Image (cartoon, rainbow, N blue to C red):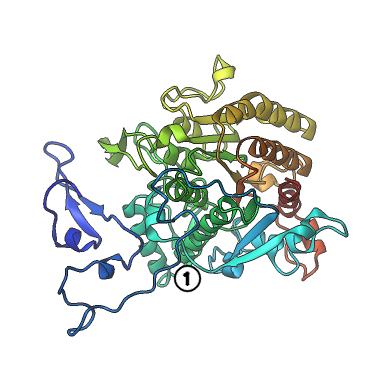
Amino acid sequence: PGGSEGGEGEERGLPSKRVSILAPMMGPPNKMFCKRWLDEQAPGACLPQGAAGDSASGPPQKKHCPARPVGHTKDAFAGAPPRPPRGEGTLVLTPDGFCLAHKTGNACLECPRRVELLCGDTGILRTGCGEGDELKRLKFETVTHQAPLADLLRVHDWEYISDLMKRCEEAKLHRGKTWLDPPGHPRDTLVSPESYNVAVRGAGAVCLAVDRVVGGSVRNAFVPLRPPGHHAGPSGLVYSDDGCPTESQGFCLINHVAVGAAYARYNYRGTVERIAIVDFDVHCGNGTAAIVRNLRPHKHTRMISSGTSVTMPSFKPWLDETDSDSVFFASLHLSASDFYPRLAVKECCRFGEPEFGANEDSAGDDPAYPNVVNIPMHKTSTNEESSRLFRSLVEGKLLGRLRDFRPDLIMISAGFDGHREDVEGNRGWCHLLEDDYEWITDRLCDVADETCQGRVVSVLEGGYHVPKKAGKRSGDAMASALATSCAAHVRSLVKG
C-alpha cells in the first residue's frame, strides 16, 4: 500500500500497525493501518492458491456475499448506464429495533424515545394526523443489515473506527456504558455494548435509501435513525486549524449522511456524478464539513501533547480526484461563541475569520473550499424574527448556489432542534416552527425536481423536544416538537 513491502498483517489484509517517522528527534508513533475491500471478513476471502483455509484439509468454505446494489452492474464502468426511471412515492426506512439498543440513559437528550415517537407503533409517521393526511401514503421498510466496513472507511479513519469498536467492548465492563469523548474534554457522547452495531446499521439504512431512490423504486426517502452523525468527522472529533479538537462529538458516532453520499458517488458513477448535502440542524454540521474538505489533498495538524504538534497529509477520496468539485455541502445553523460546537468558525472557515465579520455577504465562505458553504444565523428572540432570517438566508445564500451546482442527488441532514419549543437543543435562541421546516423542504424538493428527477434522501440528525412517556397514545407524538416538525418535513417529501 505504501509502495514498498509491508508486514505480515498488511499482506493478509489484517489490521496492523505501521511505524512512521513524523518529525526529527521524535519517537516514532505507531499508526493504525487497515484498508478494507468490503468488511472484516475480507482476509478469509483472498488466500493464495493452495493456502490453508479454516481447516487443515481442503479450501476455505465459500462465504455468502450480499447481492450487489442497483448501481453495481458489470457494465457500470463502461460509460454511463441507462438513466433510471423517475420513482414515485416516499419511503421511510427504519433500522431494525428502532435503534433502541444504543443505550444512553434517561438523563441524556439523545434518547430512544426520539425515534419511537416518529416510527413506533403509534409514532406520528405511522398514524398521521387524521384522515386525508399525506403521511397515510408513506411506504415503510425495515432495515436489518449493516453497512460494510469499506463504506465506513471512505469517510472515517480506521483508527477511529477501531477505537469506537473497542469502546463498545469496554462498555460491557463499565455498567453497560462508557464515554467516547477522550479524557480532558467535555463529555456528552456515551456508548453502550451495541452502539457500534446500531450506528453501522443506521449507515446501512442510508445506503439502502440511496439504492431505492437512485434505482427509481421511490422518488425520495427518509431515514429516522439515532444516534445522529453530522458532528462526526474523519477521526471522530473534528480538529481546528491549530490542531486542537473540538469540545465533543455531540452524540455522534458514524456520519451516516456522508457514508450514504460516498456510497452513491462510488457505486452510481455515470448516474450520480454530483451530490449535494444540505444540513439545516441548528448546530453546525462540522463533521460533514470536515469530511467534504478531506476530499481534497491537504495537510492537517494534530496536537499530541502540550505544546507539541505534528502536521501530516490527509486525503480520503470517495471515487477520484474530481470528488471535491462534485460534492456540495451547505450548513445553515445558529452561530455564536457560546453555542455548540463553539469552534464552528475554525472548523468550517480555514482562516478562522468570524462568521459575522465586516463583510457579511461572504461570511463563512472559504476560497480554498468553494463547495463548502456555511450559512450562519444569529440569535433571535421571536418566531417572526427567526423565520424571516431563516427564509431569507435560504433564498439569498443557498438556493441559487444549489441550482448552479445542479446535483444528481440531494441528501438532507434534517435536524429539528431549531424549533422554539426545543429550548434544550437551541437554548432559547432560535424559534422556528413546523411551517419553516415544511417550507425549506418544499424549496429543496423544487430544486430536486429541476435537476435530478426529484431524488432526495433525508436523514434525521438533531431534535430533542420529547415529552415524558405517558402511555401508548398517538397523542403523545403531537406533544413533541420533534415529532410534529419531522411530520411536516416528511409531509413535504410526500407532496414532492
Report x, y in % for residue 270.
46, 43
- Total count of labels: 1
Horizontal relation, residue 311 to residue 346: left or right: left
Q: Residues within 10 Å of mark 1 (few under 14, many from 20)?
A: some
Horizontal relation, residue 369 to residue 17: left or right: right
Q: Which of these two is toward me, 140 or 416?
A: 140
Q: Which of these two is toward me, 23 or 315?
A: 315
Q: Secondary structure at mark 1?
A: loop
**Occupied quadrant, residue 170:** bottom left
**Occupied quadrant, residue 411:** top right
Report x, y in % for residue 282.
62, 40
Report x, y in % for residue 75.
41, 52
**Residue at image coords 39%, 52%:** 182
Q: Which of these two is toward me, 79 or 351?
A: 79
**Residue at image coords 70%, 60%:** 118
Q: Which of these two is toward me, 49 or 79?
A: 79
User: Which amino acid lies under the numbered mark 1 shown in the image of this protein?
Assistant: Gly
Q: Which residue does the numbered mark 1 point to in the structure image?
A: 176
Image quadrant containing the C terminus: top right
Horizontal relation, residue 361 to residue 34: left or right: right
**Occupied quadrant, residue 383:** top right
**Residue at image coords 47%, 32%:** 348
Q: Is residue 351 visible?
A: yes
Horizontal relation, residue 66 to residue 330: left or right: left
Q: Is residue 380 visible?
A: no
Report x, y in % for residue 29.
19, 48
Q: Farthest residue in the bottom direction?
A: 57
**Relative to residue 192, is residue 84 depicted above or below?**
above
